[in-house]
């Protein structure tokens, strides 16, 4: 396979700022006003109890919680600026924060698509194939997030099958299902089994992530709070992500949507710190716009780029790790999916995102996980990784002798300097066509999607289960079997 | 047509640096060594005469010219950091330099392509249609560069037909054919006629550009020198562009290729200043790599991104306007063409390019001008323009009242704040699909290229010749008729 070796990405670029200090401060002040004057609704009694105990202004009847800005500052400041995630394979451990980037694949899509079988509801077999493909892609640092829903399995227990698949088919840390307390408890138990560590050690060694979405505007629902509390109590980092689509769940103006995103993220992060001071958390950003004609979410747009970059400025202001995405609303793998994804990826890089969620395979605003898009995205990410590696200027790369030895109008193909380097000098594309028009036509005029189709199949054929551990496998099987026998297995 | 209004782009981003001061200095020092120890070959007696007179070390027999770094510094310093280009329509005048960006379309392709007629050798009719399309695109600040060769016209005089088409079908400043002195003299004469100014005034009012390519490595051919001298003598700015493809015409290592690009550009720019001190010039960059399996040029690659950004650092170091490109080697309009172009455009922005040449429609490393790619590129450029416009944070955009008026879990679709802004709040795509999967399928599952196909046809139907001037037209006709009667009309 032509891909570069697995390694976490170091981002050497200076973070880009498009809002100045005063603008950022005004967005933050509006976020404080949202928290102080309007409040967030927490649909969970236990959460209200904790919030009241720590000095938030709680209205038990409505569930509305108002946070003084001093309270927010005090509690959010307890969150660490970076932390380590421990994978089943310690060589896949990740640093989350600073200049590091970790990419995770598509998560939570109801549909799956490929060129051979078309677009269809996801199954457990698709989910497993996607996990295998993700494990095979060196650009991915995290495994899913349930990459596609296994709609052929019972809803209440399909997270157990997903966790077991994730913990046997892949060796990377993964993103658990954050909806409801029990699903997180199951994830923590099963990751502990797979890592061969006890719950006490898990408390000090974050080993999984979970996206905690806010039902924007200003509502945190019972199930999400359950999942969040279980994550934090167990020392596992939630990615707190408001669902702020400008024009629908947020004001139509990006500064307003960002004020809301900031308020919602900071309010929930402050709550997380009240549950467990010093708990690792991630500031999640998802702000984009909807198309105002159709009401459909749009991604990779100019508004999305801006929101991502200013969101990153805000996360850095609060010294929190930052999550962005590789997002597109395109319906199939071609030009639009490419430009929306590449705009998203550049914005993630320039905003110094620490986690790029949905980095491969995400289509249609999250409705579909695509096999071919996974390969296309791997190409885009690998190109980014390539140009972000350190730039080396020395006698060898300056090549004065080669410059001297080639006469005016000559060429460098045959020089010793070229011959010694030609195999590894340049990035080698995964699916990019390097033949000219005539040769490409003669070879069948393949599209990038067709080339991606051939590559993911080769990757699945070459896939080998990483470090199978029969004892852990048996223990996971036993855990899943026991839990499936319990009534209401996914109860929050 | 859904496109934003015509306006030159202001680039508010800080220029990106990926080479540090020491690295940049080492590249520059290697460039000086190339100029001092190896030299550039000038295949033109008149040029050698001028170079010798100004203190360069000239070997008349071989045409090799060696430049002391002090001499290069002295002469290049005379070039202005920015200048104005005067268009036929004064509202299309452009500033070249500083934070301004001017985009020009595809130039010099031998083939033309569209979905209906396929890929085929260019004709004068295609050339005129492309000029009309470029005139219709608000993202373009310059007209061509002969957008496609008119292979159905005699080679010696087809530049005359091109200039006349350009000066009647479009109202923007354009890029003339830089090969040979006579072609530039014709351009200057004809632009003067179209603008209704005399040659003396043209001298102080740059009104056309021309790309002067160096036959890398280290050769400047007779025809290009003829064109360059004619440009400079007439006060018109050449875009001095080495043809430095790493692994072929340059060392396989990017720092070496950049040292060569720097040496070639600075040597020729120093010569231009000897011809006419203070002459406006542009530092042109084109450094990319070839695919080492096929030998074919590759564009929009990680190596291209790096070379473009460091090239921009070098141009700023020398206080010269900088030219980059929107480049791709892809064979048709789909994913690969999109990612290569978007990587090129981001690199151009981050490197603070002042001219983006081939900004629309360029395919296959320059072998084909594509109608559909023109529209795709317009979409990409318009998205960039949109997110680069000033970010406004005020009470209106912070939208606290809207945030207050929508209850938790509610939506903003119906608020007064949304209703007042929904039409112009967001970037409106030219061809991006905003419908969901089902609606898109029902409407025929169109590709971006198909949508682009429909749009360029609508644009050509809606095209109107800008400010026709019968007297200027007559004078241009007379000029062309007279010149076509002359023997050897294009003689250098």
Image: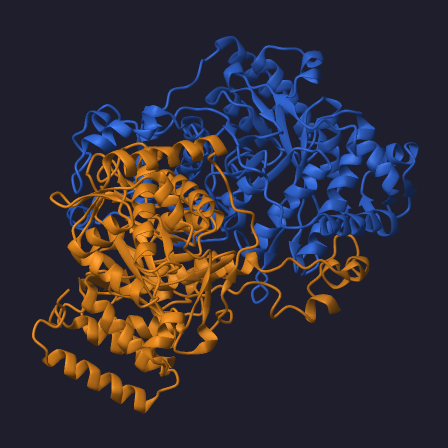
Chain colours: A orange, B blue
In-front residue for pair A469/B480: A469
In-front residue for pair A379/A137: A137
Please report the residue visible at 47 percent of the width from the left and 76 percent of the height from the top. Answer: A91
Q: Quadrant of residue B54?
A: top right
Q: Can residue B492 be seen here?
A: no
* Position of residue A488 measured from the top left corner of the image (x, y, whole percent): 8, 71
Indicate whether A338 appears above or below B482: below
Indicate whether A430 appears above or below A462: above
Number of numbered discs on residues: 0
**Is residue A389 rendered to the left or right of residue A268?**
right
* Position of residue A443 measured from the top left corner of the image (x, y, whole percent): 41, 66
Q: Residue lying furthest top in this view?
A: B471
In-front residue for pair A175/A454: A175
Q: Residue lying furthest bottom in this view?
A: A470
Indicate whether B107 appears above or below A431: above
Please report the residue visible at 54 percent of the width from the left and 23 percent of the height from the top. Answer: B164
Q: Can residue B405 be seen here?
A: yes
Rendered-image quadrant of the C terminus of chain A: bottom left
* Position of residue A347 measured from the top left corner of the image (x, y, whole percent): 44, 47
Please report the residue visible at 52 percent of the width from the left and 56 percent of the height from the top. Answer: A99
In-front residue for pair A295/A12: A12
**Is residue A416 rendered to the left or right of residue A155?**
right
**Is residue A264 rendered to the left or right of residue B257?**
left
């Amino acid at each position: 396979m032509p891909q570069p070796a697995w390694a976490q990405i170091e981002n050497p670029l200076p973070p880009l700022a498009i809002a100045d200090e005063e603008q950022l401060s005004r967005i933050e002040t509006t976020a404080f006003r949202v928290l102080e004057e309007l409040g967030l609704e927490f649909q969970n009694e236990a959460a209200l109890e904790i919030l009241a105990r720590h000095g938030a202004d709680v209205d038990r009847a409505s569930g509305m919680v108002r946070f003084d800005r001093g309270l927010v500052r005090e509690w959010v400041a307890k969150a660490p600026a970076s932390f380590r995630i421990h994978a089943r394979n310690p060589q896949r451990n990740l640093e989350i924060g600073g200049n590091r980037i970790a990419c995770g694949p598509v998560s939570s899509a109801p549909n799956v698509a490929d060129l051979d079988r078309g677009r269809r509801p996801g199954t457990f077999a698709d989910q497993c194939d996607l996990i295998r493909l993700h494990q095979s892609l060196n650009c991915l640092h995290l495994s899913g997030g349930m990459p596609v829903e296994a709609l052929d399995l019972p809803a209440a227990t399909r997270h157990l099958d997903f966790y077991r698949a994730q913990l046997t088919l892949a060796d990377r840390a993964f993103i658990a299902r954050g909806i409801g307390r029990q699903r997180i408890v199951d994830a923590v138990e099963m990751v502990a089994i797979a890592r061969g560590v006890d719950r006490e050690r898990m408390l000090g060694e974050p080993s999984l992530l979970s996206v905690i979405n806010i039902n924007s505007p200003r509502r945190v629902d019972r199930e999400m709070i359950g999942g969040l509390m279980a994550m934090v109590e167990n020392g596992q980092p939630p990615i707190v992500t408001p669902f702020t689509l400008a024009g629908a769940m947020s004001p139509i103006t990006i500064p307003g949507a960002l004020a809301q995103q900031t308020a919602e993220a900071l309010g929930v992060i402050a709550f997380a710190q009240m549950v467990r001071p010093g708990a690792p958390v991630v500031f999640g950003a998802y702000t984009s716009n909807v198309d105002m004609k159709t009401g459909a979410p749009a991604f990779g747009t100019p508004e999305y780029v801006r929101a991502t970059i200013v969101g990153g400025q805000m996360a850095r202001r609060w010294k929190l790790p930052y999550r962005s995405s590789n997002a597109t609303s395109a319906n199939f793998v071609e030009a639009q999916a490419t430009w929306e994804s590449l705009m998203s990826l550049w914005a993630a890089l320039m905003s110094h995102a620490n986690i790029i969620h949905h980095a491969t395979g995400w289509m249609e605003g999250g409705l579909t996980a695509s096999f071919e898009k996974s390969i296309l995205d791997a190409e885009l990410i690998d190109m980014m990784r390539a140009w972000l590696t350190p730039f080396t200027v020395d006698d060898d790369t300056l090549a004065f002798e080669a410059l001297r030895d080639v006469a005016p109008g000559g060429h460098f193909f045959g020089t010793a300097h070229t011959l010694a380097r030609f195999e590894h000098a340049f990035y080698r594309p995964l699916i990019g066509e390097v033949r000219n028009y005539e040769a490409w036509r003669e070879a069948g005029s393949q599209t990038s999607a067709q080339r991606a189709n051939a590559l993911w199949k080769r990757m699945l054929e070459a896939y080998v289960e990483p470090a199978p551990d029969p004892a852990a496998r048996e223990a996971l099987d036993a855990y899943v079997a026991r839990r499936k026998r319990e009534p209401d297995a996914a109860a929050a």
